[in-house]
Image (cartoon, rainbow, N blue to C red):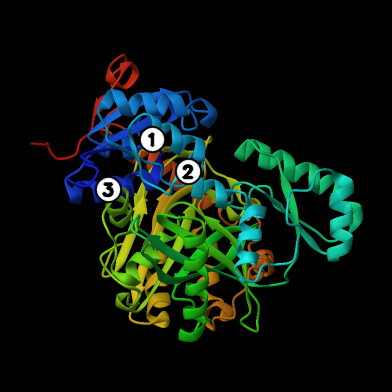
Amino acid sequence: MLREHRINKLLIANRGEIAVRVIRTCRELGLATVAVYSEADREALHVLMADEAYPIGPPEPAASYLAIDRIVQVAKAAGADAIHPGYGFLAENPVFAEACLAAGLTFVGPPPAAMRAMSDKTAARRMATEMKVPVVPGTSSPVSDDAEAARAARDLGYPVMIKAVMGGGGKGMRLVSREADLPAALRMARAEAGAAFADGSIYIERYVAEPRHIEIQVLADAHGNVVHLGERECSIQRRHQKLIEESPSPFVDDAMRARMGKAACEVAAAAGYVNAGTVEFLVDRDRNFYFLEMNTRLQVEHPVTEMVTGLDLVREQLRIAAGERLGYRQDEVRLRGAAIECRINAEDPFAGFMPSPGTITGLRAAEGPWVRNDSGAYEGYTVPRFYDTLVAKLIVWGADRDAAIRRMARALGEYRIVGVHTTIPVLQRVLAHADFRAARLSTALLERMLPMFRPAEGRYRPVAMIAAALTAYERLGRTPAIPPSPSPGPWRLGARRGWGPPRP
């Protein structure tokens, strides 16, 4: 039990691997857990693992995982003390945080005011500028119309980046190389931002060619203590979506880490930030860094920081939310070894990374020393088409970067998923690439490699057909690993008890 604010029971307002990951820490802390699920997630792993699970609506996120009133209502009815938002969905929504607080629930995240201060990217850029933290040149407020956007782009000089004022994750971002392409890019960026964040506001920023994307993990308590936990290199991206992350960055030395960490902590303190957050920077080849934004939530790539610091960031989030002090100073934070994370998505890299929803008919996760698999999938699980394609995060630790790369290569070679396409072949090729091994990284590296992902015509079709036939044959007459739920029953009508250990 976390005693300051008496967190005994936590509702996780999310799904998939992050919900599973939060549940595991809660179980270690002796906290009861409550899962919520849409109709598409009736047999999702987070639902099966939680102590209790409640339906919240149809598959579409707007009617389920984004339904603030419904989630808060379930939390109160279940007797939860607190809500953890995970990442994505409502994690950076200050209205949701306010709704939790108004209902007497502890929100495991920053105060709504700090969230608002940093969720508006242009406001965050102005704050960083006031604090003498360098920013990429761009507009200091949202552009009101296409004419203003065109003027700003001409002043900055092409190419430019269009970016959503709210949210993150690459949504609402477009690279524009010439003025003729600007109107169409503005329309697409506004539409994507509006759909993802309910706010289509955008701003314009100068494009930095082939930078590194390096971010600093910060923790801040309600007593004025702020520390950073080093950096993560997140330069391996496709269309602004990260695929591989590592900590520490092979490009950052101790002096640079100290400067970036100090800047990140100053930004967090100026915003009145409390809890876990990430300050993101672009870094050029001369080691100049530029503030991008602050993500006011737990990051997908947080496990690499956990591996090199030995800290459980979800545990730290819960401690801070309960009002506890950090309990350690900046000079007591130590980074040991190197960690790498690969995101395994249900996408077909040989067909333009098209999503590959479907039933996982076979699964063997990688194992072994210093290998961690964060996943919400299991054999027989159906990857729904309504949500992010992330199936698992494979994380390894090594005594140094070379050891971590070798371990990750071995682990990816062991990982088997049958029934859906995955990005494992891409991850293997990136890890084997000479530039990656030599740490010659940039956000453009993967884009240059994409022409490599062309299989020989028809090469895999016979193998796939044989594998599918054998899988179907072997499954005939077998009892499913997880039997289907009865209908009607608690899955449809209300709460379902999870299959975790019995609670006293």
Q: Specify the quadrant that holds the N terminus.
A: top left
Give the spatial CA distance, label 3 vs label 1.
13 Å
Secondary structure beneath dot 1 equals helix
Is residue 334 among what the camera can see? yes
Residue at image mark 2: 112
Residue 443: x and y, percent? 63, 68
- Mark 2 and 1 residues: CB-CB less than 8 Å, in contact? yes
Measured as percent of width and height from the top left, residue 193 is found at: 67, 42
* Residue type, label 1: Leu
x 20%, y 35%: residue = 499
Which residue is painted at 66% across and 48% down in the image?
Answer: 165
Identify the residue at horizontal 26%, vertical 70% (top origin).
Answer: 369
Quadrant in which the C terminus appears = top left
For residue 123, the mark is none
In this rendering, the answer to whether 385 lies above or below 342 is: above
- Name which of mark 3 and mark 1 comes first in the sequence: 1
Give the crowd class for mark 3: few <14, some 14-19, many >=20 residues within 10 Å: many
Q: Residues within 10 Å of mark 1 (few under 14, many from 20)?
A: some
Q: In the image, what residue occupies the spot 34% across and 72% down?
A: 308
Element marked by disc 2? helix
* Image side of residue 67 versus residue 199, left or right: left
Asked if 58 appears above or below 175 in the picture, the reply is above
For label 1, the residue is 101
Crowdedness near tag 2: few (<14), some (14–19) or many (≥20) residues, C-alpha within 10 Å: many
Q: Is label 3 in a helix, a strand or a loop?
A: loop
Which amino acid, by three-letter code, is at mark 2?
Pro
Q: Nearer the viewer, residue 5 or 303?
A: 5
Give the amino acid at mark 3.
Ala
| The disc label shown at residue 322, or none | 3
On the rendered structure, is 125 left or right of 65?
Answer: right
Mark 2 and mark 1: Cα distance apart in space: 9 Å
